[in-house]
Amino acid sequence: MKQSASDSETDDYEQPLLHRKQDNDIIRAPVLCSSRYGLAILSCYGFFVAYALRVNLSVAMVDMLNSSSSSSGANDSVCPRHSSPARPKHNHTASVYDWDSETQGWILGSFFYGYIITQIPGGYLARKYGAKWLLGFGILGTVIFTLLTPVAADLGAGYLIAVRVLEGIGEGVTFPAMHAMWASWAPPLERSRLLTISYAGAQLGTVVALPLSGQICFYLDWTYVFYIFGAVGLLWFILWVFLVSNSPSSHRRISETERTYITASLQNELSPTSDYIPWTSILTSVPLWAIVVAHFSYNWTFYTLLTLLPTYMNDILGFSIKQNGMLSALPYLGCWLLSMGGGQLADYLRETCLFRTVIVRKAFTIVGMMGPAVFLVAAGYTNCNYIMAVIFLTVSSSLGGFSASGFNINHLDIAPSYAGILLGITNSFATIPGMVGPVIARSLTKSNTILEWRTVFFISAGINLFGALIYTLFGKATAQSLWCAIKAVRRRASVSPAAARLSASAQAL
């Protein structure tokens, strides 16, 4: 079969979309005060909330444990503890628990057992009914269960695990719903910019939540971690309800210039119907499975560090709860900065330098996955050199920010009309590392030795390299020809799905 490129790939390469005023009379709408960038900023805030609620337990867990029964730091390979200022006496009122390392692993990983359930349904529901309310209520549910976390912890580890699963169910719709919304809002040559601004909230939430959680634990107690971030989430929900619309056509405050610009630039990419979904073509797409492998591999390292880096900082490098959050946040600060800068660079290379989209996506994926693997392995050999350990871990996670403009938004390149569903599929597989990664890592580090953690780092790095290789070999950045052909046939005439597939196959031969 002959592969045909979409407008967003071939036409942009030969003559950039924004320069085609004479042909299609598409005039680029200003960025300042635009609705599409307003959506990017507010969705950034939403992902800030989502990730703050996801990671705050990682730091709070250090303070929730009864230090006399938690993992001992007496092993010779564990570094000497750093000096820490005396903690205020009033912050000892919260309960502490006697959870062993295996129980800790299940608690930290339980979020992802709920998170995986709503990935594909989230993409489907967002495409069929709209993403605004689905995403809004998803994060609101996570906020409510976050506020209930201290009560659940007092009732027992099982109740806490159940609450975290329910949080995951609510948050599982966020990325598929947002991808589905961007399919209607993001002009092709602004995708990298808009999506990296939007999803950079995930890194920003991690950057703020980790150190702030440490400070809250130090000066108040761990229960306030969940109350404070829960209140921040409630404020976001109010803003989301009143300021966001599902599409430019339904937005009440968008300018006519911007509405025309967005709809005209997307007119050849979006399907006019949400009734038919080419499941067979989707599930047999090699480029989609390349994204699946890359997404799974990247998230193995990301989630392992996200959930266990505070534990590593405490149990191995010996940093106090106050220092822990600050140092654990450094890798994600770098990741946020490079993801933002990478989005600008990616679209500059495509729009101004006329680099093919597939080259940009693969290059950013290689840097964003192979780079972290190298520095993660290096961190395992720093022993008790605290400075080098923190530097290598920071560089490792920072380079991962480039992948935000690589495989992470590739769904919109290969099938913009089905981007939410595609992200639901890839994120379902990519959630598995969050479910099993912390459990496996804690089972491998029962004695908390540097050698054991080195093994954890090696496993993560190897998986990362494998994912980068598969995506480099099989990744694409053109709308898949058979899907587009089906869409075109159904747009031209009202025919049955079977007839559409038959006609599409004839066109593609």
Image (cartoon, rainbow, N blue to C red):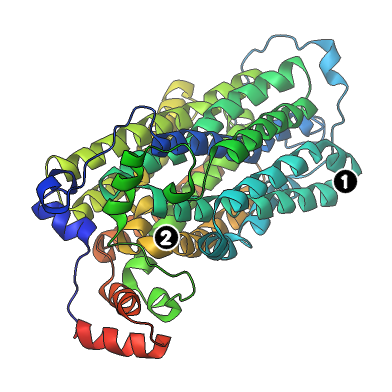
Disc 2 or 1, which lies upstream in sequence? 1
Residue closest to the eye, 5 or 118: 5
Q: Residue at x 59, y 54 (%)?
A: 173
Above or below, 69 relative to 23:
above
Q: Which mark is residue 249?
A: none
Q: Residue at x 60, y 54 (%)?
A: 172
- Residue bearing mark 2: 419
How many residues crowd mark 2 within 10 Å: few (<14), some (14–19), many (20+)? many
Looking at the image, do the residues carrying marks 2 and 1 touch, with CB atoms under 8 Å apart?
Answer: no
Q: Name the residue type under label 1.
A: Gly
Taking the image as shown, residue 99 lies to the left or right of residue 229, namely: right
Q: Residue at x 74, y 14 (%)?
A: 219
Badge 1 marks a residue whose secondary structure is: loop
In the rendered image, the quadrant that contains the N terminus is: bottom left
Q: Position of residue 174 (x, y in %)?
A: 56, 50
Q: How many marks?
A: 2
Residue closest to the eye, 194 or 292: 194
In this rendering, does residue 371 appear at all?
A: no
Q: Position of residue 25 (x, y in %)?
A: 17, 48
In this rendering, does residue 358 appear at all?
A: yes
- Residue bearing mark 1: 156
How many residues crowd mark 1 within 10 Å: few (<14), some (14–19), many (20+)? few
Q: Name the residue type under label 2.
A: Ala
In the rendered image, the quadrant that contains the C terminus is: bottom left
